[in-house]
Image (cartoon, grey):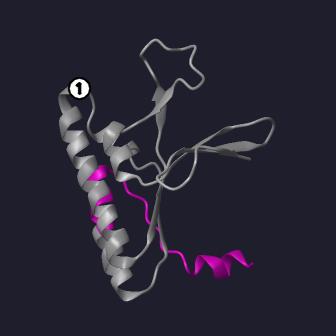
Amino acid sequence: LDPAVALENVAYARAHNSEHQMELLKLAAAIMSQDRYALIVVDSATALFRTDYTGRGELSERQMQMAQFLRQLTRLAEEFGVAVFITNQVVANPDGMSFAKDSTKPIGGNIIAHASTTRLRLRKGRGENRICTVFDSPTLPEADAQ
C-alpha cells in the first residue's frame, strides 16, 4: 500500500488547547457531512484539558469541559456512524497500594470510563513486544493479546 495514496483518505488536525479541540469537533462534523468517514482518532483526549485547567480549584470545570467534549464525540459517532478511538494518559495511583499488580489509573476518572464502551490498556512487554489488555467491555472478556 502506497502511504501517499492511503493518506489521501485521511483528514487530520492538531489542537493547540482544549477550546481549539472542541472547535475541531465542529469542523469534523462539517467535513463528515460532505464525505464518508469511518473512524475518528483523538490522541490524548485529556492532555489539553489537564494543561488548560490546573489544580484542584479548576478540577470541576475541567471535568465538565471534558464531559462536553466526550458527549460531542459520542454525538458524532451516532450521527455519522463512525467509530471513535481515543488515547489517554495514566498516572500512578496514590492510594498506597504500590504492591498491586498495576498501580496506574487513567486520567479523567469516571467521565472517561462512562463515555467509553470498550477500554483497552497498552503496556510494554518483553523486548519490542506490546501487550493489549481488554480492561472493560460489555461484550469482550478481560484478556491479553500480544
Q: Is residue 48 magenta?
A: no
**Residue appearing at x 40%, y 43% in the figure:** 47
Left or right, 32 with respect to 66, comes to right
The part of the image, by quadrant, that contains residue 101 is top right
Nearest to the observer: residue 106 or residue 18: 106
Left or right, 55 with respect to 113, comes to left
Q: Is residue 24 magenta?
A: yes
Specify the amino acid type for callout 1. Arg
How crowded pointer 1 is (Cα within 10 Å; few <14, some 14-19, many 20+) is rated as few
**Residue appearing at x 37%, y 78% in the figure:** 80
Residue 56 rendering spot, x and y as whole percentages: 23, 26
Residue 104 rendering spot, x and y as whole percentages: 51, 28
Left or right, 80 with respect to 119, comes to left
**Residue appearing at x 32%, y 50% in the figure:** 17
Nearest to the observer: residue 31 or residue 17: 31
**Residue appearing at x 31%, y 44% in the figure:** 111
In the rendered image, which residue does mark 1 sit on? 56
Residue 53 rendering spot, x and y as whole percentages: 26, 37
Is 13 rendered above or below residue 50?
below
Residue 6 visible to the viewer: yes
Specify the segment rendered in magenta.
1-25
Is 41 rendered above or below residue 43?
below
Helix, strand or loop status at disc 1 = helix
